[in-house]
Amino acid sequence: MSRFGKLSVMTLALSVSVPLMAAPEEIQVYLDDLTAPGRFGSDVHTNYVLSGPRTPDYPGALASNHLFRFTPEFYYGLTKTVELGLYLPTTAAPGAGAHYEGEKLRLKYIAPHDEKSGPFWGVNLEVGRTSHRVSEVPWNAQLKGIYGFRSGPWTVGFNANLDGSLAGSPASPVALEFDTKVAYEARRGLQLGFESYNELGPLRDLGRLKTLSQMLYAVVDAEVSKKVDINAGIGRGLTSASDRWVMKAIVGIQY
């Protein structure tokens, strides 16, 4: 097993004992994209809840209805297979104003593969400290398994996410989320498709899907230029626990 495989297994084993933390500032299915070694890039993540629950998930949390999230992300290519990134999430909510919510670091590994056809896989480890407005616990982590493949004009990606906390209370179990992306290249530089984001619940009690968030997005991916790309979409909640309607956009820039 490679050192990255060992790291993933160790992190998974440790995460089984830590509580849940979600990451609503980023609505994205990870694929095999990486910044070239020695190069910088940035993404600007934005999403706005057009219609959602008006009651906070816990005391002190922001209710999601009409919540706007703005998250700059900066990343650097360490090697041909490893990328280091930093998130700086912010929020703006009715009656609560705008707030800076913390920082998150991530390390992404994508195994060598054919970038035009066939399968790809990788892992992404994210650790951060965020405010009580967006998380019940200050220190949180996510381990993301990445798998996908390309065949002709089709790209399919799968993410299996384990979310947990590293410190703080109240304690809660680690939870699993499974995300999917299916995209069709309508023409060069333009893809149309769907993304789904599905909470599966705590590892010790999986499957109560009707009581968890299940979101389906219609999305467009477009290359504006060789250095700028956009992912945009609108999502519909499929359960009563989900936000009803959400708009999202990600603008990526390579330097």
Image (cartoon, rainbow, N blue to C red):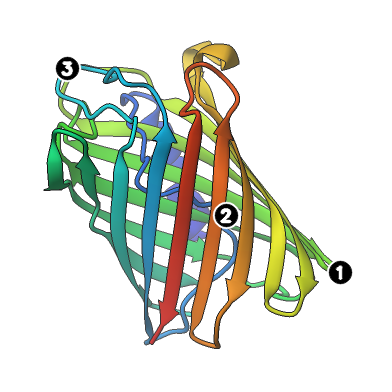
Disc 2 or 3, which lies upstream in sequence?
2
**Which marked residue is nearer to the observer: mark 2 or mark 3?**
3
Q: Is residue 236 visible?
A: yes
Looking at the picture, which amino acid does disc 1 mark?
Gly
Q: Is residue 207 visible?
A: no
Dot 3 falls on a residue whose secondary structure is loop
Q: Which residue carries the number 3 mark?
A: 59
Q: Is residue 216 above or below residue 182?
A: above
Disc 3 or 1, which lies upstream in sequence?
3
CA gap, disc 2 and disc 3: 44 Å
Asked if marks 2 and 3 touch (Cβ < 8 Å), the reply is: no
Disc 2 or 1, which lies upstream in sequence?
2
| Residue 195, x across and y down, in percent | 63, 46
Query: How many tags in the picture?
Result: 3
Q: Which residue carries the number 2 mark?
A: 1
CA gap, disc 3 and disc 1: 49 Å
| Residue 235, x across and y down, in percent | 56, 40
Image quadrant assignment for residue 141: top left
Quick one: 207 or 121, which is closer to the camera?
207
| Residue 170, x across and y down, in percent | 20, 17
What residue do we see at 49% from left, 85% from top?
227
Looking at the picture, which amino acid does disc 2 mark?
Met
CA gap, disc 2 and disc 1: 31 Å
Image quadrant assignment for residue 24: top left
**Which marked residue is nearer to the observer: mark 2 or mark 1?**
1
Looking at the picture, which amino acid does disc 3 mark?
Pro
What residue do we see at 38% from left, 45% from top?
48
Q: Which residue carries the number 1 mark?
A: 152
Q: Mark 1: few, some, or many residues within 10 Å (few <14, many ≥20)? A: few
